[in-house]
């Protein structure tokens, strides 16, 4: 039936954290506070140090779905079940593991048509069924192929694609950033102490915080409104900035 061939495809909001920095960009904050420690006779200085780097995204989340309509809920549901299963089978044939696919949203809604000049919900004309699945994978390079495969198999909604840096990758790269941030903080403390005719003789406290710098870039990909997707879809995973901030209190003498 015609519901099996619904070809409207939503635009895909591609969440790409793209930053135009070098392999390692090193930036420190300029704040410094010098004063006596009220709990001791020590003179201290508080400084911030920062280091950052950009890492290539190694994790992707793809959300896509199937919409069907029919005069009866059961017929719309049967059509949706068949198309959704066809999409899942096609994705698995394209290399997606079954454990990487999960249902994100399912809905059956009545469709009403209002008559001009009347009030109320209108006349019931049919039912719509929506089934959305999410693919989560550590293979971001294959997402273009998966979208093309899913659309050809019956998916008519590509909701979004998001790329992130995995926790394991961040963990394996955070060590050097901590060292750089500490070095940056100490350099600033030494410079400030020298300007005051003092020098750093010890450290009182230090705290380390890591997070994300900058903000995400939002792009849009418009899929064809009819017919199969032709050619490779230009989707780029990009990079994301990871930063470490150090707050240190040094003792001056």
Image (tube, rainbow, N blue to C red):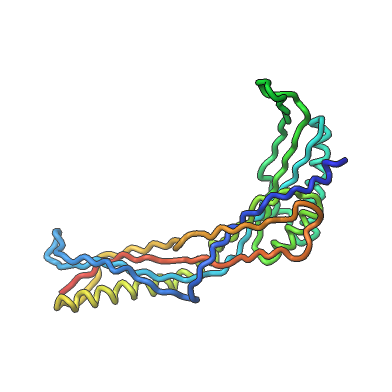
> Could you tell whether 111 is left or right of 1 in the image?
left
Numbered label tally: 0
Q: Quadrant of the N terminus?
A: top right
**Residue 171 x/y as whole percent:** 50, 66
Residue furthest right as drawn = 1
Q: Nearer the viewer, residue 176 or 197?
A: 197
Q: Residue at x 27, y 64 (%)?
A: 205
Q: Nearer the viewer, residue 79 or 35?
A: 79
> Could you tell whether 26 is left or right of 1 in the image?
left
Image quadrant in which you'd find residue 249: bottom left
> Could you tell whether 103 is left or right of 218 in the image?
right
**Residue 158 x/y as whole percent:** 69, 51
Q: Nearer the viewer, residue 26 or 2?
A: 2
Residue 201 in view (yes/no): no
Q: Quadrant of the C terminus?
A: bottom left
In this rendering, the answer to whether 13 lies above or below 190 is above
**Residue 52 x/y as whole percent:** 43, 70
**Residue 250 x/y as whole percent:** 23, 69
Q: Residue at x 66, y 21 (%)?
A: 120
Residue 222 in view (yes/no): yes
Q: Residue at x 39, y 62 (%)?
A: 209
In this rendering, the answer to whether 190 lies above or below 137 is below
Residue furthest left as drawn = 41
Residue furthest front as drawn = 117
Image quadrant in which you'd find residue 138: bottom right
């Amino acid at each position: 039936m015609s519901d099996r061939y619904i070809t409207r495809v939503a635009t895909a909001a591609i969440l790409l954290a793209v930053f135009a920095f070098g392999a390692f960009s090193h930036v420190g904050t300029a704040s410094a506070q010098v004063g006596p420690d009220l709990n001791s006779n020590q003179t201290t200085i508080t400084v911030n140090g920062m280091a950052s780097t950009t890492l290539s995204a190694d994790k992707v989340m793809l959300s896509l779905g199937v919409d069907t309509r029919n005069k009866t809920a059961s017929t719309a549901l049967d059509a949706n079940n068949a198309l959704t299963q066809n999409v899942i089978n096609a994705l698995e044939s394209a290399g997606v593991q079954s454990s990487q696919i999960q249902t994100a949203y399912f809905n059956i809604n009545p469709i009403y048509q209002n008559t001009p000049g009347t009030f109320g919900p209108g006349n019931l004309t049919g039912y719509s069924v929506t089934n959305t699945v999410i693919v989560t994978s550590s293979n971001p390079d294959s997402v273009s192929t998966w979208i093309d495969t899913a659309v050809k198999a019956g998916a008519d909604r590509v909701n979004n694609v998001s790329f992130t840096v995995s926790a394991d990758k961040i963990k394996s790269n955070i060590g050097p950033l901590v060292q750089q941030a500490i070095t940056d903080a100490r350099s600033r403390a030494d410079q400030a102490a020298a300007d005051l005719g003092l020098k750093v003789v010890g450290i009182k406290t230090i705290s380390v915080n890591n997070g994300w710098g900058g903000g995400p870039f939002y792009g849009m990909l418009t899929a064809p409104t009819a017919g199969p997707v032709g050619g490779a879809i230009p989707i780029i995973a990009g990079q994301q900035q990871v930063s470490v901030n150090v707050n240190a209190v040094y003792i001056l003498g």
